[in-house]
Image (cartoon, helix red, strand yellow):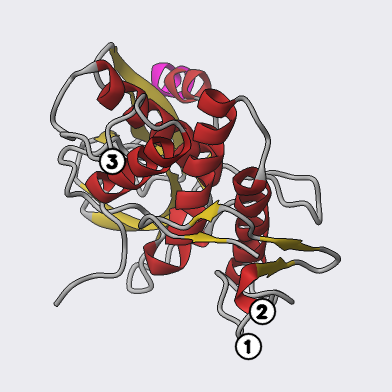
Amino acid sequence: MANLSLSFSELYNLVARFLYKQQLGKWYENIDTKSTDPQTVIIKAICARGYRQFLYPVDDRSGQEYLWSFLKQYYTINLQDGKWKYALPENFSEMLTDPSFSDEDGYYQLTKITPERLLDMRVSSINVIVPSFYAIATSNYDLETGTYYEFWVHGEPNSSYTLQFFYKIDPLKPVETSDYLVGGIKATEAILENCYAVAEQQELNQFGIHTQLAHKLTQDLIKVDSGQEAKTVLGNLYSGEYESRYVRGDNIKFSLDDLYVGEGTSFTE
């Protein structure tokens, strides 16, 4: 069954068609997403910027960076007898909760310390006991893949244990253009508009309707994601013959005149 989420390939071509409509003769309407020609490289760079802009937004209500719920990943580590270093997932960014033992084990939650402090403690003594301290340390840096992280514990495990925690993910670059965007269906329109906004600013040298719409949809989704019902809708679903031509916010209403909506259609009064 087809999925309503967008793949990276679909995202690239929607942005290509947007620029094709805005600057006829300069851009291809469709691109070969596996090509390395200059236009494809530019389109992919635009989409990467728009994607990052969506992934790390600022909540207008608080003025603070907002962490999407879909970037919070549950994870378990199986500690092994005598082993104190463990590789963390490739998409690991930072810990959101301190690791705790499984309910069956019933031990106290681990306390976070610096990697330097943990190594000092290992020099002083290595106790083969139930671990009570942990540290997040950087592993080898690779030019192609970036920085990886390790999970260290002290004391050294005297048996097998299961630790559980939540961490923040940094989504990885797509391996295939058929890979889907993070966030599911709800995030699709906001991601697309953020990419249109970057294309609008970078290639058309303007802060136009897509820049406004990207901000609106992102803020609406933040409200929904945080559990507060937004006073607006995600998208442009309104009843009435003309109502669908307007985007409404809490204190704004603006027309979608000449707004490109993805498949060669514009709204005009």
Q: Amino acid at mark 3?
A: Pro
Q: Which residue is mark 3?
A: 89
Q: In the rendered view, would you say 165 is above or below 106?
A: above
Q: Amino acid at mark 1?
A: Gly
The answer to whether the residues at label 1 and label 2 have Cβ atoms under 8 Å apart is yes
- Nearer the N terminus, badge 1 or badge 3? 3
Q: Viewer-proximal residue, 146 or 103?
A: 146
**Residue found at the very far right of the displayed protein:** 251
The disc placed on residue 256 is: none
The boundaries of the magenta stretch are: 120-126
Is 69 within the magenta? Answer: no
Q: Amino acid at mark 2?
A: Glu
Asked which secondary structure carries label 2, the reply is: helix
Q: How many marks?
A: 3
Q: Which residue is mark 2?
A: 243
Q: Viewer-proximal residue, 231 or 223?
A: 231
